Image (cartoon, rainbow, N blue to C red):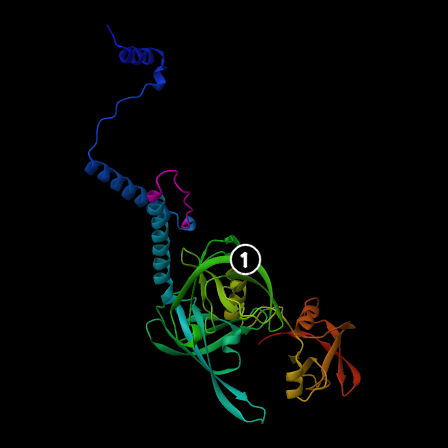
Amino acid sequence: MLNQYEQLQLTDALTLPKAKRRRRVPKVSAAALVICVAASSLFGFAGGAAVNMLRPENAAVIYSAMETDSQYNVTNLAAVANNSAAAISGTSSAVKQSVVEISTETVATNAWMRQYITGGAGSGVIISADGYVVTNNHVVADARSITVRLANGQKYPAALKGADAQTDLAVIKIEANELTPVVFGDSSKLVVGEPAIAVGNPLGELGGTVTSGIISALDREITIDGENMSLLQTDAAINPGNSGGGLFNISGQLVGVVNAKSMSSSSGAPVEGIGFAIPINTAKLVINDLIKYGYIRGRIDTGISVVDISSVQVAMWYRLNQLGLYITKSTNPELRNGDRITMIDGKSVTYSDSFNAALKSYKVGDTIDITVDRDGRSVTVPITLQEQKH
């Protein structure tokens, strides 16, 4: 005769669907369980790392949190951090040999018209095994001497092969062979949020410095020294001296040439985590022309140099009573140093950004009228645009 407890057990066994009958699980020792978990973790992370190595373009992997015990989530996050750090470390080691330090000497003139020598520093990227290096135009502009220091410490004098102020790019050449050039990437394939690595010479004395971050934005329209540029934005740390250095993707391909850091906001407050680079697809076209011709074909030359006088303090320093765009040098004898440009073909011009924007609608061979203010009177001078060959 079954007791009440045994009868209930029998009833449950007969009425429960087969799918819901619970199978007995053999007992497993604590030591065996630990070994299984460890093996699972090891092979799981090794597999993920292998996928990353085989697919460098997808090296940044986002892991979703496991719906299990929190300790496994922590383990996964640690693995992601370790994989990311290893990728950055490996990429940095590979590309550092292709980034150089640049130092310059320039003759400057003070307010009393006395000349003196001033030093400058920046970065550059090796683009050929026989010594061609790309950097920023503003790093080497007007330099009387340029010196390149390789990652191994060797120094070489450099010759300027060509420069372009509009894109802020320049190519210099050192007499060296068997260098390690960069591998060009494709900046059109960049996406916001992917890893970015900057290598350069911050402060002009910390060559080979590596910083990392992400691509923060694409096609940022930025005006630098009167030139409108479409740039990459990154939050990788960039400081004075990084100019001309490389911005790389996680695969070690050059995707940009660093050229600017945002130093302050419109209110004057300092800003960190904002840097800019020239997209490599833009730079490649310029580099090719600079190496082959020494200039950018089709660029117009007005024959004049200009400077923005945009603050009262600067105007007072130059003893000027009006802000605006002033001519500092001219190959046309009818235009003089100190003339303030007011119009191009009847269109108002205030500073260099509007001046350059107005010139973009013209081509080599066109004739334009430049109107200037000279000692309180308006003077209009026609000039024929030449091809810029310097």
Spot occupied by residue 286 in the image (x, y as percentages of width and height): 54, 66
Which structural element holds mark 1? Answer: strand
Looking at the image, the residue that sits furthest to the top is: 1
Amino acid type assigned to the residue bearing label 1 in the image: Ala
Question: For the magenta stretch, what is the residue range?
Answer: 59-72
Relative placement, left or right, of 77 versus 161 is left
* Residue positioned 49% across, 65% down in the render: 257
Q: Is residue 45 above or below residue 225?
A: above
Residue 55 seen by the camera: yes
Relative placement, left or right, of 59 versus 286 is left
Relative placement, left or right, of 2 versus 126 is left
For the N terminus, give its image quadrant: top left
Looking at the image, the residue that sits furthest to the front is: 4
Relative placement, left or right, of 240 versus 87 is right
Residue 121 image-quadrant placement? bottom left
Spot occupied by residue 325 in the image (x, y as percentages of width and height): 69, 79
Q: Which residue is mark 1?
A: 217
Q: Nearer the viewer, residue 34 or 128?
A: 34
339 inside magenta stretch: no
